Amino acid sequence: MNTPEVVIDVTGLDVWYGRRRILHDVDFRVETGEIRVIMGGSGSGKSTLLRHLLGLHRPTRGCVKVFGIDIARASRSQLQEVRKELGVSFQGGALLTSLTVGENVALPLREHTRLDENTIRIMSRLKLEVVNLGGFQDLMPSQLSGGMIKRAALARAIVMDPRLLFFDEPSAGLDPVVSAELDELILRLRDALRMTIVVVTHELESAFKIADSITVLDGGCVLMTGTVDEVRNADNARIQDLLNRRPREVTVDVDAYLRRLTEEDAG
Ligand SMILES: Nc1ncnc2c1ncn2[C@@H]1O[C@H](COP(=O)(O)OP(=O)(O)OP(=O)(O)O)[C@@H](O)[C@H]1O
């Protein structure tokens, strides 16, 4: 599979869950070799967009193309081809506690390739070295710190040499120094391994350090996509609220809230 200039091309994506519209006419393009950060407040639709990019859900309307393949219309073998090129490191995607660090990293190779044991071991160790965990393969996850667990999970996400890496909240729960180390690592993956990387994060400092471009989501809409400076200087009150951590003004309509709950219960 050749790598096209545009790795992700989403046009007019609408997502409804029941009667609630979650994503509104989202356009989202990511080019080869860039680090794109998706930013937005809680409930703005970041995870929903990510799930559609991974082909875990079908769009209600619109088109999601990854490596030029329309995810909703792809055959099973095309989807498999695409998925082989994706690495995913999710917030909840912790390591399996009953396996060593090395066995955790080796899992995708065991599941998706027919490589022999020796090659699998070498490849997993190499990836542990990439994330600065060389020599840690025989430890159990419980013996690692939070930052090390994130890095080990990252080693597992890149063990198949994906061309496109998704990283959900890399800095969540980490102290600032460890979080900065992880930022360096993400930059290294782009530069040394030429990966295209999509990162969802709440951490502004981290976003500004690693992003080639940032997409800001709010209420399921793309407010803007731009460089770090463009987003920082955006003449948009909602974006400035997000950057300055100002809470939005919320007026709660109790009747509408209760109505929505009943509608959701009814399916
Ligand atoms: N499976 C689902 N069914 C119904 N509603 C959902 C579902 N998944 C998400 N939602 C709703 O969609 C909206 C967007 O959720 P999403 O998880 O995508 O936001 P987010 O930006 O990732 O939030 P956070 O930063 O808190 O993880 C929320 O209002 C959420 O309640």
Image (cartoon, rainbow, N blue to C red):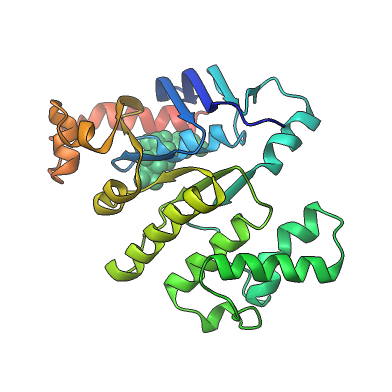
Give the residue drawn at x 72%, y 23%: 74
Write the residue at 15% across / 26% down: 236
- Between 229 and 239, the one nearer to me in the picture: 229
Q: Is residue 55 visible?
A: yes
Depth check: give the residue in front, 247 or 255. 247
Tally of numbered tags: 0
Note whether 130 is above or below 165 in the view shown. Answer: below
Q: Nearer the viewer, residue 188 or 162?
A: 188
User: Compared to 225, does 62 lie above or below?
Assistant: above
* Residue 155 in the image, given as x and y percentages of width and height: 58, 62
Q: Quadrant of residue 93?
A: bottom right
**x and y percentages locating residue 168 in the rendered image:** 45, 50
**Which quadrant would the N terminus be assigned to in this image?**
top right
Q: Is residue 248 visible?
A: no
Q: Position of residue 84 (x, y in %)?
A: 71, 43
Q: Is residue 179 left or right of residue 106?
A: left
Q: Is residue 136 above or below residue 171?
A: below
Q: Quadrant of ligand 1?
A: top left
What x and y, as percent, mark residue 157? 60, 55
Vertical comparison of 64 with 117: above or below: above
Q: Residue at x 69, y 19 (%)?
A: 73
Asked where in the image residue 152 lies, by quadrant, the reply is: bottom right
Q: Residue at x 50, y 29 (%)?
A: 266
